[in-house]
Amino acid sequence: MDKSGNRQGVSRRDFFRRLGFGAAAAGLAGAGLAAGRRAGSERLVWQIDPFKCVQCGLCRTHCVQTESAVKCVHDFPMCGICDRCVAYLNPSSVDLENGAENELCPLGAIRRQLIEPPYFEYLIDERLCTGCGVCVKHCAKAGKGSLYLQVRHDRCLNCNQCAIAAACPAEAFVRLPADSPYVVRHLGREDLERRLARVGAGGSA
Amino acid sequence: MSIRRRMTTLLRRPAWLLPAVLVAAAILQSPASGQLVLPAPEFETDYQRPEMSMPAAEGTVRDAIYVGVVIAAMIAAIYFVHYRRSRKAVSLLSVISLALLGFWLLGCICPIGAVQNVSRAVADQSYLLPWAAVIVLAAPLAAALFFGRVFCGGVCPLGAVQDLVLLRPVRVPQWIEKPLGLLAPAYLVLAVVLASCGGPFIICQYDPFVGLFRLSGEAWLIVAGLGLLALGTVVARPYCRFLCPYGVLLGFCSSVSRKPVTACPEGQCVNCRLCENACPVGAIRPPTDQAGDHPVRGRHPAAWLLVMVPFVLAGAGWLAGPAVARLHPTVELWREVERDAGEPQDVRPEAVEAFYMSASNTPEASSVYDRFRLGMMIAGAFVGLVVAVQASIQIRRPVRLSFGINQRACLACGRCSQYCPVEQKRRRKKAASGRATVPRRKAAEGAAAASVASGVGARVGADRAGLALTLKRLALISGVFSLAVAGALVVAWARAEHYPLLEWPQMQALQEARRASPADTAIVDEIRALDAHYRVQYLGRQQMLRTGGLLLAGGLLATLGLLRWRSSITAELPQMPPGGPEFMDRAVSEHHAARGGVLAFGVAALVAMLAAGIALPEIRRPVAPPDEAPVAAVPNWPRFRGPTGDGRVPDGQWPQWWDGPSGAGIRWKRPLPLEGKGSPVVWGDRVFVTAADKQKRLLICFSADSGDELWSRELQSPPPTTSQPSDPPDETYTGWAAPSPATDGQFVFVTFANADIACFDFDGNQRWIRNYGPVRSTWGLASSLVLHGNLVILQMDQGSEPEEGLSWLVALDKRSGREVWKQPRPVSGSWTTPIIVPGADIGATADGIITAGNQHTIAYDAATGRQLWQTQGIGADAAPSPVAAGGIVMAAGENGEAFAIRPGGDGGGEPQIIWRWDEGLPATVSLLATPQYYLQIADNGLMTCLRAESGDLLWQHEPGGAAQPSPCLAGDVVYLLLADGKMLRFRLGPMFEPLNVSILGEKTAATPAFSDGRIFIRGKEHLYCIEGAERPADGSDRPPVGDKKQEQDGGAVEVFDPPSDDIFGP
C-alpha cells in the first residue's frame, strides 16, 4: 500500500472513509425514516393535571423563569360564590371582610367582588399570582376545587424537559396538544383523559 | 415522505374530525359535568359568570419557524465555510443564529436535546415524537456527512456564545484534551440510556447556557454557564469540545464527510504551517515526518489488552444500573415509599403523600431496574469501545505527509483560512476580477498584509496602543460594574428565595394574637402594615432581579465587546510553530501522554461505575407488588373467601377426605385462646387468625407447616371511651372476632367488633391502629377487610335506618392508616363483605367494589370511591356477600330475594335486573357463582342451584345439617362446611352430584382457607391444618341419602338416590 496518497488507486484511508460515509449515510437515512414515520405533527405543550396536583408549591420555585409560568386559574361554573370562601379567607379570619388580616393569598392576588348578597365573585389577578398554590390547597381540601394550578401558555417557554415536571412529586405534569392546552375542570377527568389518549405516552411527563 | 404516505396521514388525521370529536365530547360530557358544576342561583341582576381566560399556546407554526431558521442558517453556513471561506461571514452568521435561536426562540427544541426525544421514541412506542425534533436532529448530521460540522461553526447558539467570548486561545495539551474529549461520548450515552428508560432529559436539565438566553434559571446552572464562558475566554469552546453529546455524532459524520472543511482551496496546500496555530480547538494536524524524524510506529506489546476494555466497562455498567436508575421518577418514588413504610414519619415527603392520595399501586420499579441494567451495560460497552479505540490510535501514530484537518474536531469556524496564503491569493485574484465590493477588497488586502508574519509589532502604532489602553480601562470599568451587579443579584436572589408565604413567624404570632382578641383593631393595623411591608419587599426584589439580570447581561456584553475590540487591535498573528527534532520529540511524548490520559479516563469511568454500583446502598431489588400477581400463581389465601373474595379456590390438588376424631389427614391441630368466627388467612408459611372477647383482641400467627405459634399479639387499642360497641355483638351469629383478616404479603390488617382497624407486619409489630367506634350494629360487626392496591377497604354499615347516616365505605392507606376516601352509604346495618371486581367484568373502566346492603346494591370505583351505579338491595339483615361471574353480579338476602344484575358500567348505563328468585334464600352463608351456575345455601342447609344467566332452577338439595361457613369452589367441586364440622364435597353442575363427606368433629362457623394443597379450618376451639388422607376403600365417606326432591322447570324430576359410586344419574 502506498502511503503517500497515490493518485492511481484508492488509499486505505480513503477506502475506510468511503465505507464510513456509506454506513453513516445509510444509518442516518434509515433512522431518519424510522423516526419520521413515528413523528407526530401535533405540537405538545406542558400542562398540570389538576386531578393529580397536590399543591406542594414547587411550581412557584422550579420554573426556569424567575416568575413561574404556573398560575392559579378559576373555573367559574364550579365556584360556590359563597361569602365565606376557604380559599380567599385565611383559617383564622374572624370576620368575612377583605383586608390583609383576613386574606389567605400572601400577595392578595384574589379579588373579591360582590355580585349581590350573599354571592361573591372571586377573580385571580395573574400579575400578582406566584403559583404558590396555597389557595388551591384550601379550595381542594375544603371547597369545590374550582381553583387550580395551570401552566399559562402566554408565559410558558415549553422547554423540552419542563423543570417543574421533573420536580413534581405527584407526577401531575402532562403534555397536551397545543390547540387545546388547558384542563377545564368542570368538564371532568374524562375530558382530560380523552385528550391524553389522543397524544399517547407523549402525554405522560 | 412520499405523496401517498402523506395522503394516508392526512386521511388518518382529518382536520374535520376535530370539531366532530369536540361536539361528541361535549354531548358525552353532560352527565359527568353535572356532578361538578353547581347550578347558578337566580341572580336578580343580569350577572353573567366570567369565562376562564385561556391564553393560546404557540402551535406548530413555532416549530416550523425554528426548523426554518435552523435550515436557512445551515445553508448559509455551508456557503460561508466552503465557498466564501470567510471567517467574518461565519462569525456574523453565528451571532445572528445566537440572536434568533438563542435569545428569540429560547433554545427549545434544539438538536442537542432532540437526541433524547428520539431515543425515548425508539424505546417507548407510544411516545409522541415531535416532527421538529426529528428534523433538527437529522439535518445537521446529514449536513455533516457532506460538508463537515458547519452546524457547530455557524448555527449552534451554544457554540456561538462560546465563540463570542474567546479572546486569547491557548493550546490545551494532548494529555488533557484527549481524555476530556471522552466525557462527551460518556455524557451522550448516559443521556440516551436515561431518555430511553423513561428517565429525565439530562442534556436539557443541565444545559449551562440556556439560562443565559432566558435571563433566568437555576442559579447554580447560570453560575456554571458563566464559569464555562469565563474559561472559554482562553480555552476555546469548552462545552463543544469536552461535553457536547451531539458533537460526538456530528464528529463521526464529519470524519467521513464527502467535502471536508479545508483551510486552503482543495489540494493546494503548500505546507507553510501558517494555519497550524490559528485553530483554537487544535484540529489542524501537522505532518508527522517534517524534520526527517521517524514517526512512532508498531504496536505496544500489551495492546491486545484493550480488547477487554469494553467488556470490563460493560460489566461495571451492569453493576451501576440500579444506581443510575435512581434518577428515574418511578424508582425515586418507590424508594421514598419504601423508606416511609420502614419508618413512618409525621410529615411525609410530598411525593409519598401524593402517591398515597392517588391510591395507585406500589410503583413498579423492578422492570425499570432491568432496563437500566441493560442500558448501562450497553453504555459501558460503548464507552469502553471509545476508550479502546482512542488508546489504540494513540499507540499507533499514523503517518501524515501534509497538513490536514481533524474533521472530527473541526468546528468549521473558518479561522484557518484567514491565514492561508493560498486562500488569500485566491481572494486577491477574485477581488482583482472586479466582482468583489470595495470593503471586501479592503478586508482581503488587510488580511493579505497580515499574512506577512514579520513586522507585526511595528504595525501597532502609538495611537493604536493608546486606544488599546483606553479600551482596556473601559473594559475594566464595565467588568467591575458587572461584578457589582452580579453581587447585588446574588444577595437579592438569596433573599428572594427566603420569601415566606404563610410561615412568617411574625405574622403567625400576630394572627394568634388577633384570634385571642378579635376586637383589637391595633393588631389589625399591625398585620396590615407588616403585610404591606412584605409585599413591597417581595415585589421590589422581583423587579430588582429582572432589571439586575438585564444590567448584568449588558455589562458583560460591554466588557466582552471592549475586550474583543482591544484584542483585534493588539492581536499578534499566529507564530510559526517550532520545527526540528525537538518538536518531533515533543509531539511523540505528548502522544504517549495522551494515551496515558485516555487509559486513565477509562479507569476513572470504571471506578465511578463500580463505586456507584457497589458503594451506594441500593442493593435490595424492588419487587413487583404482590397483589398484581395473577391469582393462579399465588398459592395464598389472603382474605375472606380467598384471593378473589368469592370462594373460588386456586387450581391445585386439595384434600378429599379426612377424619377429625381419628386424626386421619389432619396435619396439625392447635387450640385457640379465644373464640372467633373469622376465617384464617394464609400467606406462604404464615397462617393468621383473629380471636377476641370483650376485653382482648388478638392476632395470632402460626406456621402453616409445623403449626407452631410464631407470635400472638394483643391489639394496643386507642382509649376505650369510644371503642366499645353500644350493643354487644350477638354470640351466635357474629361475636367479638367475626371479620377475617386480610394480608398483602407484607402486612396483615385486622378489624374487630369494636371497629378497631389495625395493621401488623409479618413480625408482629403493630404499625398503626384506628377506631371507628362507637358501633351501632344490631348483631355486631362482621364485614371483613378488603385490600385493593394501596388501600384497606372496610364496609361499615350500621344503624337501623339509612337516614341515620351511620353507614359508609372507607378506604385507608395501607402504610399509614390514613383515610384516603370515605363514601357515605344510604343503607342501614348489614353484615356483608364487599368484593373487588375487575372493571372489564362490570362494564367499567376502573376496578369496582360491589357492596350488598339492605336497601341498595352499590358499585364503587375501587380507587376513588366514586359511586358507579346502584340498584335494589337484598332486604333486611343483609349478611351473604355478593358474587360476580360472567359479567353478572348476584346478591341475595333472606328477607328480600335473590337477583342477578347486569351492570351498566360507568358510561351512564343503568344496571339491569335480569332475574329474580325468592325461595330457599340464604341468611348468613355467602353465595357461590360461576358463569354457568349460581348456588345459594339457606341457614337450614337447603342448597339451591340456578342457571346463572337465566335464573332457571336446576336443583335443590338438603345436606342434612345447618350451614354457616360459606362454600368454596375448587375446579368444579364445591367444599361446603356445615356448622357441625362436616365437610360435604359435591360437583357443581346441572345436577347435584355428591362426592363424599369428611368429619372434623368440632363445630365451626368460619369459612375454610385453602393454601398450598392444605385446608385450614377454624373450629370453635381449635385451628386445623388438613393435608388429607386416602379415602376409605369401603365407601364409608359417602354422603347420606338426600331427602328433598324438586321438580325442574322442564318437568323432569331430579331424584336423589343413594350413591352407587361417585357418579349419579337421574
Image (cartoon, coloured by chain):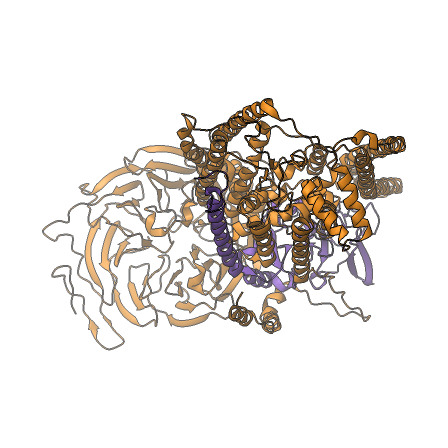
Chain colours: A purple, B orange
How many numbered discs?
A: 0
Residue placed furthest toward the left: B1034
Residue placed furthest toward the bottom: B1051
The quadrant where residue B705 appears: top left
**Percent x, y for residue B633?**
33, 49
Q: Is residue B126 visible?
A: no
Quadrant containing the C terminus of chain B in the rendered view: bottom left
**Percent x, y for residue B257?**
55, 48
Residue appearing at x 15%, y 62% in the figure: B1063
Residue appearing at x 70%, y 35% in the figure: B232
**Percent x, y for residue B222?**
71, 38
Q: Is residue B474 visible?
A: yes
**Percent x, y for residue B976?**
27, 55
Q: Nearer the viewer, residue B177 or B855?
A: B177
Q: Nearer the viewer, residue A178 or A185?
A: A178
Q: Nearer the viewer, residue B738 or B684?
A: B684
Quadrant containing the N terminus of chain B in the rendered view: bottom right
Q: Is residue A39 left or right of residue B669?
A: right
Q: Is residue A165 left or right of residue B929?
A: right
The quadrant where residue B481 appears: top right
Q: Nearer the viewer, residue B205 or B622?
A: B205
Q: Is residue B681 left or right of residue B500?
A: left
A114 vs B619: above or below: below
B46 vs B516: above or below: below
A202 vs B50: above or below: above
Q: Is residue A140 left or right of residue B1017?
A: right
B592 vs B855: above or below: above
